[in-house]
Image (tube, coloured by chain):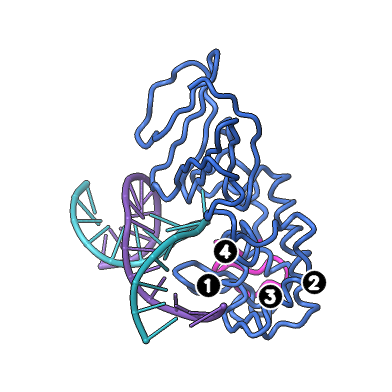
Chain colours: A blue, B purple, C cyan
Amino acid sequence: MGRRVEQVERRGKVLILRFDVGSLLVHLGMSGHLRLCQGAPPTEKHDHLEILFPGPWRLRLHDPRRFGGVLWTAGDPLEHPLVAGLGPEPLEDGLTGAYLFNASRGRRVAIKSFLMNGRVVAGIGNIYANEALFRARLNPLQPAGGIARKGFDRLVTGIQGVLQAALRHGGTTLRDYCDGEGRPGHFQLELNVYGRSGKPCLACGRLVRHARQGQRSTFWCAHCQP
DNA sequence: ACACGCCCCTGTTAGC
DNA sequence: TGCTAACAGGGGCGTG
């Protein structure tokens, strides 16, 4: 009560709200969102947490599936186990073709699963993993350890390109996603392969394929991503 | 260490 | 129309 949010940052998919006495770590999971509310609109089902600010403002956490979570830590939040082991931020200097190449040597796991492993790179989810691999012309099913250095250079370009484009479009709203003010994103209109199985590849016209990897949907064009 | 499968949970939709 | 199964943007955990 009565504490001031001194800084807000993000590591991977974890939001960090720093207070003078500790930090709140917030993960939104699949279906969660934070919404800035003015006044006291009626509480909805699956509203789980509310942070009250002076004046009319309040921040509400809404998460139907409850895959998200909120944790408090009194120590350095970046040392918390939830984020301490994360790989480099995709839009910062630590993510390079050389880094991914080195990290993948000897790994037989499919490149898409490798990319979605937070210990390798932070914060790449299913949509952007699929889209980044399309941009890099890499088959998502191939073992990470067999990819040449050039492929990882393209992959870094693909990751950064798709994330920056998605940011420009306000994110990808398949159903639930919205920003803190309730606005949906538009990047779903720009997707090349995600969710497009059986439809023509936007680059070559051949049909986009679908497979499951680790209980996640994978989409790719077998011609553009050999 | 690594790869894989299962699980958490609710809501929506496809298929019968 | 109604029921059921499958699936959804994430990630931790147990097993071999």
Percent across and percent down for residue A153 are: 80, 71
Of badges 1 and 2, nearer the viewer stands 2
As measured in the structure, the alpha-carbon distance from the residue carrying label 1 to the one carrying label 2 is 25 Å
Chain identifier of the residue bearing label 2 in the image: A
From the viewer's perspective, tell me whether residue A136 is left or right of residue A186: right
As measured in the structure, the alpha-carbon distance from the residue carrying label 1 to the one carrying label 4 is 8 Å
As measured in the structure, the alpha-carbon distance from the residue carrying label 3 to the one carrying label 2 is 13 Å
As measured in the structure, the alpha-carbon distance from the residue carrying label 4 to the one carrying label 2 is 26 Å
Q: Which residues are magenta?
A: A192-208
Q: Looking at numbered disc 1 in the image, what kind of residue is underneath it?
A: His
Position of residue A7 relative to residue A187, above or below, is: above
- Residue drawn at point x = 79 percent, y = 73 percent: A98
Q: Looking at numbered disc 2 in the image, what kind of residue is underneath it?
A: Asp
Whether tag 1 and tag 4 are in contact, CB under 8 A, the answer is no
Q: Label 3, on which residue?
A: A103
Position of residue A65 relative to residue A180, above or below, is: below
Whether tag 1 and tag 3 are in contact, CB under 8 A, the answer is no
Of badges 1 and 3, nearer the viewer stands 3
Q: Looking at numbered disc 3 in the image, what kind of residue is underneath it?
A: Ala
Residue A210: give its label: 1
- Residue drawn at point x = 39 percent, y = 48 percent: A65
Chain identifier of the residue bearing label 3 in the image: A
From the viewer's perspective, tell me whether residue A66 is left or right of residue C4: right
Q: Secondary structure at mark 3?
A: helix
As measured in the structure, the alpha-carbon distance from the residue carrying label 4 to the one carrying label 3 is 31 Å
Which one is earlier in the sequence, the residue at label 4 or at label 2? 2
